[in-house]
Image (tube, grey):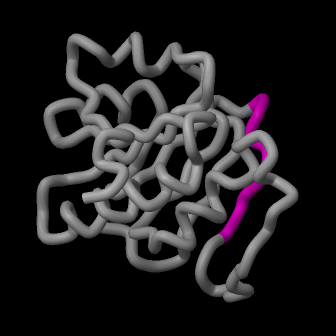
Amino acid sequence: MPGAELVRRIRIDTIEYVLREENPVLVACIRDDVSYHETLEGLETAAVFAGPELSMCFVLEDLLSYFETRYGITGTPTFLLIRHGDLMDSLLGKASVQDLMDFIRPHIPGRAESKGPKRHDSDHLIHTGNKQGLDHPAISTTTRKRGIV
């Protein structure tokens, strides 16, 4: 699969190294279920789009509790954008390739201005804005109205 080398699985012995990377990291918190391969294919396509400015990783059930505790995820799949260990943004729910590219675009240098085709489906995604100052460590959150597993 193209881009597969750009998507890596986070394991317990590499978790802190990955989360402290200089460039933003997209972490997909997923389960090994019927949508597993589809999600990985979407990540691979998004990795090719992002290039080296954004790392793509995923975690499975063995590390979900760590991400639930540290970043407050409430369901899977959840896509977290992390830089220097801090949560920059999150996307909750099943995401298409276009959803992933729209989600990561503002965090890729030189790509924020390049909007490309974008859906304007107000029932699809909700960006809840800045959460700084609340009890939860999240800075901002994008959630889906439906499709949460």
Q: In which quarter of the image is residue 131?
A: top right
Q: Which of 81 and 55 is in front in this view?
A: 55
Measured as percent of width and height from the top left, residue 56 is found at 43, 40
Check the image and report above or below for 26 versus 92.
above
Check the image and report above or below for 79 versus 131.
below
Measured as percent of width and height from the top left, residue 98 is found at 55, 73
Q: Nearer the viewer, residue 95 or 92?
A: 95
Count of labels in the image: 0
Residue 74 as seen in the image, left or right of residue 112 = left
Residue 125 visible: yes
Residue 77 as seen in the image, left or right of residue 23 = left
Measured as percent of width and height from the top left, residue 37 is found at 20, 64
Q: In which quarter of the image is residue 117?
A: bottom right
Point out the stretch of residues depicted in magenta. 126-133
Magenta highlight on residue 131: yes
As drawn, the residue found furthest toward the front would be: 2
Residue 29 as seen in the image, left or right of residue 31 = right
Residue 136 visible: no
Magenta highlight on residue 140: no
Q: Which quadrant is home to the C terminus? A: bottom left
> Which residue is painted at 19% across and 53% down in the image?
31
Q: Main secondary structure of the magenta part?
A: strand
As drawn, the residue found furthest toward the right would be: 113
Q: Which quadrant is home to the N terminus? A: bottom left
Residue 5 as seen in the image, left or right of residue 55 = left
Measured as percent of width and height from the top left, residue 51 is found at 56, 43
Check the image and report above or below for 84 versus 119.
above
> Which residue is painted at 67% across and 69% down in the image?
126
